[in-house]
Image: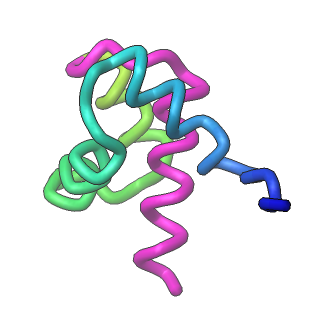
Amino acid sequence: MTASVKGPASYFPSIEKKYGRPTAEWKELIRSSPLSRHMELVAWLKSEHGLGHGHANALVAHTLAEQAG
């Protein structure tokens, strides 16, 4: 029995399906951005890459948490 994925990562399969790019690619875009604040990155993903708010928020939250840890 596999544990269900919770938190921001639970959005990753639908993000990959909807936008046609792997999660790793989105996370690399976030890491290479000159922006560093959470909501700035969310707004950037929404305006420049057409992501919805929830998807952008999940990607940014997960990526920033990895960098902090």
Residue at 47% from the left image edge and 32% from the top image edge:
56
Residue 68 coordinates in the image, percent (x, y): 49, 81
Relative depth, front residue between 37 and 29: 29
Colouring method of the image: rainbow
Residue 43 coordinates in the image, percent (x, y): 40, 28
Stretch of the chain drawn in magenta: 48-69
Q: Quadrant of the N terminus?
A: bottom right
Q: Is residue 33 above or below residue 22?
A: below
Q: Quadrant of residue 20?
A: top left
Q: Is residue 51 above or below residue 45?
A: above
41 left or right, relative to 57 = left
Residue at 55% from the left image edge and 53% from the top image edge:
61
25 left or right, relative to 60 = left
Residue 26 coordinates in the image, percent (x, y): 28, 43
Furthest residue toward front:
1
Q: Is 62 in the magenta?
A: yes
15 left or right, relative to 22 = right
Residue 8 coordinates in the image, percent (x, y): 64, 48
Q: Is residue 43 above or below residue 52?
A: below
Q: Is residue 43 above or below residue 3?
A: above
Relative depth, front residue between 19 and 31: 19
Residue at 39% from the left image edge and 29% from the top image edge:
16
Is the magenta region chiefly helix, strand or loop?
A: helix
Relative depth, front residue between 26 and 1: 1
Relative depth, front residue between 54 and 36: 54
Furthest residue toward bottom:
69
